[in-house]
Amino acid sequence: MKISINIKQTDITDLNVDAIVNAANRNLHEGRGVCKAIFQKAGSQNLRDACSKIGGCQTGCAVITPGFNLNATYIIHAVGPIWNGRDDGEADLLYSTYQNSLILAKQNGCSSIAFPLISSGIYGYPKDEAWKIALKSCKDFIDNNEDYPISITFAVLSDKSRQKGEKIKKKGR
């Protein structure tokens, strides 16, 4: 398998990857948006029980559970920052969210992972900035782990978001 970063317009819960990333909240409770879709497709009760045993996760960090009814073996629950429009370290926290997710994937032998665009939905992070940070963090991980083959997919629901990500990805080359 070669190392790659791809952007697809698709439902993340339909992907056949080793791990999908849940844009989680700090309590690891079933939320809205991507989080709700992942809980429902994985099996809400099983996932609630697994998350309850973990107890929570700090912003910028990530934890892992089984994928249950998903095609993915694992769900990595990553807690991104809530955008507040000030420079309160949100960029560093968002960068860390991706890094910590990828580290967990590597520790668990995952060769493929799918991310949503973390913090850009109900957490309000501006999409252009969220894309820049997400792609930079993933590229930095790849550069620092050249011996670790991983396929990274970003799953987005809108064509507009996909196009925006592809444009930013192209500029970063």
Image (cartoon, grey):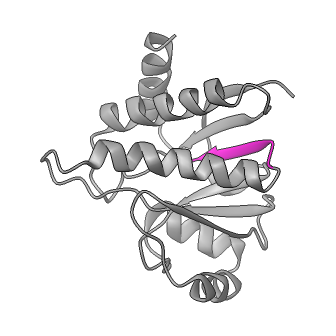
Q: Position of residue 129 (x, y in %)?
A: 31, 33
Q: Residue at x 46, y 36 (%)?
A: 134
Q: Position of residue 90 (x, y in %)?
A: 28, 48
Give whichever of 107, 75 is nearer the camera.
107
Q: Is residue 168 left or right of residue 146?
A: left
Give whichever of 57, 154 is nearer the camera.
57
Question: Is residue 112 covered in magenta?
Answer: yes
Q: Position of residue 94 (x, y in %)?
A: 39, 47
Looking at the rendering, the stretch of residues picked out in magenta corresponds to 110-115
Quadrant assignment for the N terminus: top right
Q: Is residue 109 left or right of residue 93?
A: right
Q: Is residue 34 above or below residue 159?
A: below
Q: Is residue 149 left or right of residue 45?
A: right
Task: Considering the whole magenta stretch, tell me its main secondary structure.
Answer: strand
Q: Position of residue 15 (x, y in %)?
A: 74, 49
Question: Is residue 1 covered in magenta?
Answer: no
Q: In the displayed orientation, state which residue is furthest to the left.
A: 86
Q: Residue at x 49, y 20 (%)?
A: 169
Q: Residue at x 78, y 33 (%)?
A: 148
Quarter-of-image position of residue 69: bottom right
Q: Is residue 136 left or right of residue 126?
A: right
